[in-house]
Image (spheres, helix red, strand yellow):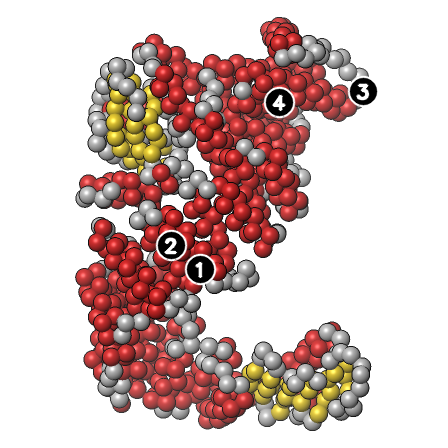
Amino acid sequence: MLQDALSGRNCGAIVFAALASVALLANGAHAETKQPPSTKKSGTKIWVEGDSIKSSTGSTISTGGGSTRTTSGDHCSYQAHTAQQALKDKDYKTAFAGYDEAIAWTKKTCGITIDDFQFFENYKGRAKASAGLGDDVAAARDIALLLTGGTFAGQRLTRDFVWMTQALDGAIKKQPENASFYRARAEIRDARADDFWIKNETDREMSFRKLSLDDRNAELRFSKTDQERASALADRHFLHKALKNPDQAYADISKAIELDPKGEYYRRRALFNKDRKGLIPRTEAVVDIEKAIALEPEKFMYYKLAAEIHEGAGETDKAIDSLSKGVALLSPKAPMYTSFMSKRAELYRAQGQLDEAAKDYATLSESSPRNAKWRARRTLILLEQGRDDDANKERGMIKAVEAKVPYSKQTLYSEAFLCDATEAYTKRRAKAGDAIAPADMRTAWNMGATLSLAPLLAFVGKPDPQLTKAWNALSTYIRNAQKKAGQKPGGLAEIPKLDGSATEQLVKMLNFVDAQLKTVEQVVRDDMGTQAGAMVAVSAAAHEAEVLSRLGTPNRTLRSVWTIADAGPQTGVACAVWANPMSKALNSLGDKPKKGETQEAWTATKTALKKEIYRLRANAKQSATKTKPDAQTKTSAKTSPETKQANAKPDAKPSAERTRIHARHILVKTEDEAKTIVEQLKGGADFVDLAKKKSIGPSAPQGGDLGFFGRGQMVPEFEKAAFALKPGQISEPVRTQFGWHIILVEEAQTSASKGP
């Protein structure tokens, strides 16, 4: 009764009813103590009628008899409060009666399935009550029914493993030829094995897999129809896969298809063949998934597997087509919509269909406006296309979305984004055939150092004569370049003498540096190229940040983060050189900056950049003295997207005659992964196929192809290893700052050879 609930004897029911009333009233409803007469008054009407709360929409919430019963347009349930308490008190007879009544009412009133949460819970309660009463067979029947309640029903019951297993054991003793009981116990044991798999407890996992296999064998033996036998075989197929019995796993799923050729079984065999080696399994996988789709074209997940299979076979166009068909079946609000769209965008980008990829990421941004990830992906594509204005708009949107996020956690300053942006600019230069000479890069670096250090050292009262001389020389260069470009030759302004407080003087001097940097960066971009202009900005920012951190004003170095995050990827210097130490500097800032860490991180950033620039210059000079590159050798630097990132271990002496080689590489995170790949290659696996599937490098979609390159274009370790290999040879794995690499040399050219 409602009065009982109000007096505290049925609190759960009244809270539920009260919340429902509040929700209705919040939507424009008004309450009455009895059914109101029909009027033209708008809004939903609700009223109390006996033990029930009713509404003019047809919804009813009833309390009484120790339960809450709800019926509405989209919800129908029976909460057996008395039965729940009785079960806790081990009053199994009362509990059974309460749950039995709940199940009967729900079947009659709701017409819903076991998938419904409350219906599921009521069946579980009745099963446990039956077990408590010693009726294992009745408990087992309910348990078997529970395990049909959706894909994750077994996982929902793992906390009930002990009493359910005991009930099923008892039921099987009484009815040893009941296939459904063996199936239920196998499902429970499988769920338990999955728990141990998640915890990485392999021995215990395998123990439960074997117990489950015994149950599947018994289920198969006592199944009476072809459909039941096919179901048992399909489930046993998974167990044989887990227990490393691939031949039996294949035989089981094939027999299941023979007995009951349904789409799901074809899908399972397609999934199994997808992960097997060789052309035949891959071909069978394509055929099977196409049959699954033909049988059940409404199953969107079939299209996801089809896309994975086609992608593995190198059929990217077909993979995109499969994803497009899957997307057509999904609402933008569906959980899998994002997965399909993002994968399609990724494949479009790998195919070079950048406009299509950008459209997909734009769609994802619209469907998830607070998620900066998709805008970041679109930004990278726009950068690669050279659509800088559009890219800057996306950056602005990302900053707005993450306005309240600490800088250290913002997308645009993350190592991942900076490295991806570096790759995007590298691809862009490769298409344009635009690459800067290492000597010009070093010149630009020195310009940036002069722009920052000369004014800042003057500010602290320690002007450097050499820097003053360099400042004047830079001013002359700028003046001449401006005159050459038909501009008013202004050069650089004189370093000012400032007044005011120390803080005011510092702000004025930084503003002065900004003004001069803007002039120099633009002139250098026009005269020497985008890379050089970006390097001027990066160098100025890195040197400035080191000085400011030494002056005890670490938070002012945030401006250097902004500059380097924008210009760093444009320089072409591998992001691993500078992004990590800069991130450490950024992480040290905040309300309580860690001054020592900031200074150390900025010094590391500047030093790493300087070493890389001087190393590239030294390599170029060394290469020039050893060989005389032909025209195509010079071009190769413009077409290799990973020339500053590849790395591997040498295993032979390099040939002095070879000046260019064509190589591929596979980059992975761990030594174990690399060793496994080497073993697969020795066993006959295809290098290109493994690179596409396993490599984490940006050349993965191209099968790890680095194109032709000469000496001085790669880091020393990679160059030494690659030039040591003969065409067709594969290196052993080697650890680098990027991970573990395996190299394959495809062709080699001498100075007399013609380019490809």
Which quadrant holds residue 634?
Answer: top left
Q: Earlier in the sequence, mark 1 or mark 3?
A: 1
- If the image is split into quadrants, where does the C terminus sit? top left
Q: What type is the residue that disc 3 sits on? A: Gly
Q: Counting other residues with Cα less than 10 Å from the Cα at mark 4, is it few (<14), some (14-19), or many (20 or more)?
A: many
Residue 376 in the image: state x and y as whole percent: 55, 43
**Residue 544 - label:** 4
| Residue sitting at x 79%, y 22% | 501
Which residue is disc 2 drawn over? 307
Q: Earlier in the sequence, mark 4 or mark 1?
A: 1
Image position, residue 676 (x, y; %): 26, 44
Residue 523 in picture, x, y percent from top left: 61, 17
Name the element at disc 1.
helix
Residue 382 image-quadrant placement: top right
Determine the residue positioned at 52% across, 30% down: 569
Distance from label 4 to label 1 (Cα)? 52 Å
The image shows residue 358, relative to residue 290, as above or below, that is above
Spatial distance from mark 3 to mark 2, Cα to Cα? 67 Å
Question: What type is the residue that disc 2 sits on?
Answer: Ala
For marks 4 and 2, give the CA distance. 50 Å
The answer to whether residue 485 shows anywhere in this view is yes
Say which element carries label 3.
loop
Badge 1 is on which residue? 326
Q: Taking 671 as reference, is 615 left or right?
A: right
Is 501 in front, or is 101?
101
**Where residue 107 sits in the image (x, y, percent)?**
49, 88
- Disc tally is 4
Circle nearer the viewer, 1 or 3: 1
Q: Which mark is in front, 3 or 2?
A: 2
Q: Which numbered mark, 4 or 3, is in the foreground of this view?
A: 4
Name the residue carrying label 3.
500
